[in-house]
């Protein structure tokens, strides 16, 4: 296929904050740890889980692995259902498909969760590939972007990443693909100048994809 648009999931396709925050709270309490302040919990949305528990929450390696296991077990039962598609996103996906774009997802969320959530929202068929974190938590955002590119059989210069976090932007840079940021999600809310276009709504994304 010729042109590829890759979406992040958390904070870009859907507001998944309720399920994520509740899962973090549950994991901390189950591990006998105090629950971090709301702003700290919100700041880690979209980041790699194992790294977050090691570096942000300061869990020793073995405890971090166990906390992630607890997080995912709770998320699988409860958090996965606590998400909502952003208004206008389904129309954006439909438009991209109608114009012949290959459309994918690259998310640091467990791949099985991402696929289930897209199915529950009724939009799984709008994507040509859904690439998420593996069971060993060893993939980076760049790895996932490359996986999407490989499946699509396209080139980096014909690929655009759409996301709401620095993880998304750095992954796009590492893969030499263009990037469009969204401000309706969990990141890019400050007044800094960024070296990429920013969108306030889902509808604006279509105007910023130049492939």
Image (cartoon, helix red, strand yellow):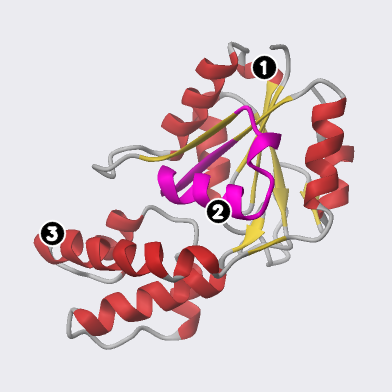
Please report whichever mark, 1 or 2, sits nearer to the chain's N-terminal start. 2
Query: What range of the chain is rendered magenta?
Result: 105-128
Left or right of 60 on screen, residue 149: right
Q: Earlier in the sequence, mark 3 or mark 2?
A: 3
Image x and y of residue 37, in percent? 42, 86
User: Which label sits on residue 157?
Assistant: 1
Which residue is rendered at x = 21% and y = 81% of the image? Answer: 30
Which residue, given by chain and number where applicable, does mark 2 sit on?
A: 117
Mark with earlier residue (1, 3)? 3
Q: Secondary structure at mark 2?
A: helix
Q: Secondary structure at mark 1?
A: helix
* Residue 134: image location, x then y, percent: 33, 39
Q: How many marks?
A: 3
In the picture of the structure, the residue carrying the numbered disc 3 is 61
Horizontal side of 201 relative to 12 (left or right) equals right
Does residue 125 show up magenta in the picture?
yes
Image vertical order of residue 190 relative to residue 180, above or below: below
Q: Residue at x 49, y 29 (%)?
A: 174
Question: SS class of the residue under badge 3?
Answer: helix
Which mark is in front, 3 or 2? 2
Distance of label 3 from label 2 (alpha carbons): 29 Å
Is the C-beta separation of discs 3 and 2 under 8 Å?
A: no
Q: Nearer the viewer, mark 1 or mark 2?
A: 2
Q: Is residue 12 above or below residue 64?
A: above
- Position in image of residue 156 (x %, y %): 61, 18
In the drawing, does residue 210 fall left or right of residue 33?
right
Question: Looking at the picture, does residue 93 appear above or below residue 151?
Answer: below
């Amino acid at each position: 296929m010729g042109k590829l648009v890759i979406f992040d999931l958390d904070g870009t396709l859907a507001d998944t904050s309720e399920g994520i925050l509740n899962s973090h709270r549950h994991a901390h309490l189950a591990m006998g740890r105090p629950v971090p302040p709301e702003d700290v919990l919100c700041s880690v949305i979209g980041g790699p889980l194992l790294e977050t528990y090691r570096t942000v929450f300061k869990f020793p390696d073995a405890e971090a692995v166990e906390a992630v296991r607890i997080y995912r077990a709770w998320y699988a039962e409860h958090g996965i259902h606590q998400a909502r598609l952003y208004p206008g996103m389904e129309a954006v996906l439909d438009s991209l498909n109608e114009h012949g774009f290959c459309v994918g997802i690259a998310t640091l969320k467990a791949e099985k969760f991402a696929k289930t959530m897209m199915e529950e929202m009724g939009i799984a068929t709008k994507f040509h590939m859904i690439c998420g974190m593996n069971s060993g938590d060893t993939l980076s955002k760049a790895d996932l972007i490359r996986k999407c590119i490989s499946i699509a059989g396209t080139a980096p210069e014909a690929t655009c990443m759409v996301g709401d976090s620095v993880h998304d932007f750095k992954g796009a840079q590492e893969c030499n693909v263009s990037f469009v940021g969204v401000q309706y999600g969990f990141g890019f809310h400050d007044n800094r100048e960024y070296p990429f276009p920013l969108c306030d709504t889902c509808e604006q994304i279509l105007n910023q994809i130049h492939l």
